[in-house]
Image: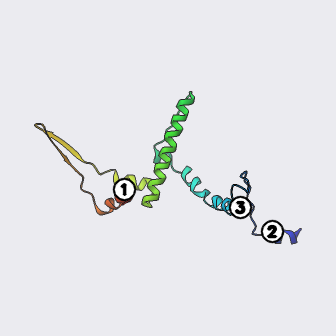
Amino acid sequence: SLARARRLVGLKGYVTNIPATLMDPSEVIGSYHDLWHVEQSFRMSKTDLRARPMFARTRDAIEAHLTIVFTALAVSREVQNRTGLAVRNVTRQLRPLRSATIAINGAVQTFPPAIEDDKQAVLDALAGA
């Protein structure tokens, strides 16, 4: 009825298979609200992770592939969390940084890259400084 519909307007239900003894209803709602983080992670472009189609036949190969993909995803999320920047942006900023090692007559010299302040800030964030 219309009266019942008006009473229910704005109410939202949550369904879970987790018993109430294990997780408080407010925790269920909080977890649901955090779900967008998971969805955002899976929307990451395949190019961000340099993912390629993989055709594996053995269980070990499939599990190894999934482990690598989820590790890359976890590292990408950590980079985003620490820097506040998209992984693609961090990659673009840091890719040009190169050191050079030169060996002349048995003497080895390594030259670090000149790092601009904005790139140093990204490196510091990644290092947890």
| Apparent side of residue 46 relative to residue 94 in the rendered image (left or right) | right
Percent x, y of residue 84: 45, 61
The amino acid on which the numbered mark 3 sits, given as a three-letter code, is Pro
Residue found 76% across the figure and 67% down from its top? 11
Q: Where does the N terminus fall, quadrant-wise? A: bottom right
Placement of 83 over or under 98, stated as above or below: below
What is the distance, in whole Å, between disc 3 and disc 2 at their CAs?
A: 19 Å
Kindly give the residue lying farthest to the left in the view shown.
Answer: 105
- The reply, left or right, for residue 3 in relation to residue 102 is right
User: Do the CB atoms of the residues marked 3 and 2 lie less than 8 Å apart?
Assistant: no
Q: Give the alpha-carbon distance from disc 2 to disc 1, as whole Å.
A: 50 Å
What residue sits right under mark 2 in the picture? 8
- Nearer to us in this view, 122 or 45: 122
Q: In the rendered structure, which disc, 2 or 1, sits on the residue that comes first in sequence? A: 2
Q: Which of marks 3 and 2 is nearer the N terminus?
A: 2
Q: Which residue lies furthest to the front in this view?
A: 21
Hey, which quadrant is residue 22 in on the image?
A: bottom right
SS for dot 1: helix
Helix, strand or loop at label 2? It is helix
112 horizontally vs 32: left or right: left
Rendered view: 11 above or below 122: below
Q: Which amino acid does label 1 sit on?
A: Ala
Q: Quadrant of residue 32?
A: bottom right
In the rendered structure, which disc, 1 or 3, sits on the residue that comes first in sequence?
A: 3
* Three-letter residue code for mark 2: Leu
Residue identified by numbered label 3: 25
Name the residue rendered at 49%, 40% in the picture.
68
- Reading the image, the residue beneath label 1 is 127
Could you tell me residue 76's position as x and y percent?
Answer: 46, 51
Circle number at residue 7: none
